[in-house]
Amino acid sequence: MIRKTRNYFTIFGILAATVSQKICSLFSAISNTLKISVPQIVNILLSRQLKPVKTYSTNNLK
């Protein structure tokens, strides 16, 4: 006997493809945001770097 197998899309296959597409889209959005924002954040942090008012050491006691 010859059996013909039918290939249907399973619910799991459709769900996996949809989730994969959503995850790729989300990853792309996060990557793009980080690529734009990180240099700006680094520049802000470097410009506002805290510096000590006076350094105290054992040789400089009054």
Image (spheres, rainbow, N blue to C red):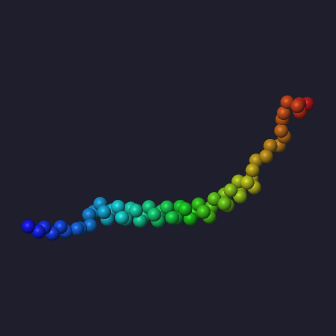
- Residue reaching furthest left? 1
Q: In this view, does 38 lie to the left or right of 48?
A: left
Across and down, in percent, residue 11 comes to 28, 63
Across and down, in percent, residue 39 comes to 66, 60
- Residue reaching furthest front? 1
Residue at 83% x, 43% y: name it: 53
Residue at 37% x, 65% y: name it: 18
Image vertical order of residue 7 relative to residue 46, above or below: below
Question: Along the line of sight, which residue is nearer the eye, 50 or 6?
Answer: 6
The N terminus - image quarter: bottom left
Residue at 62% x, 64% y: name it: 36
Q: Quadrant of residue 13?
A: bottom left
Q: In which quarter of the image is residue 47?
A: bottom right
The C terminus - image quarter: top right
Image vertical order of residue 14 relative to residue 59, above or below: below
Across and down, in percent, residue 20 comes to 40, 62
- Residue reaching furthest right? 62
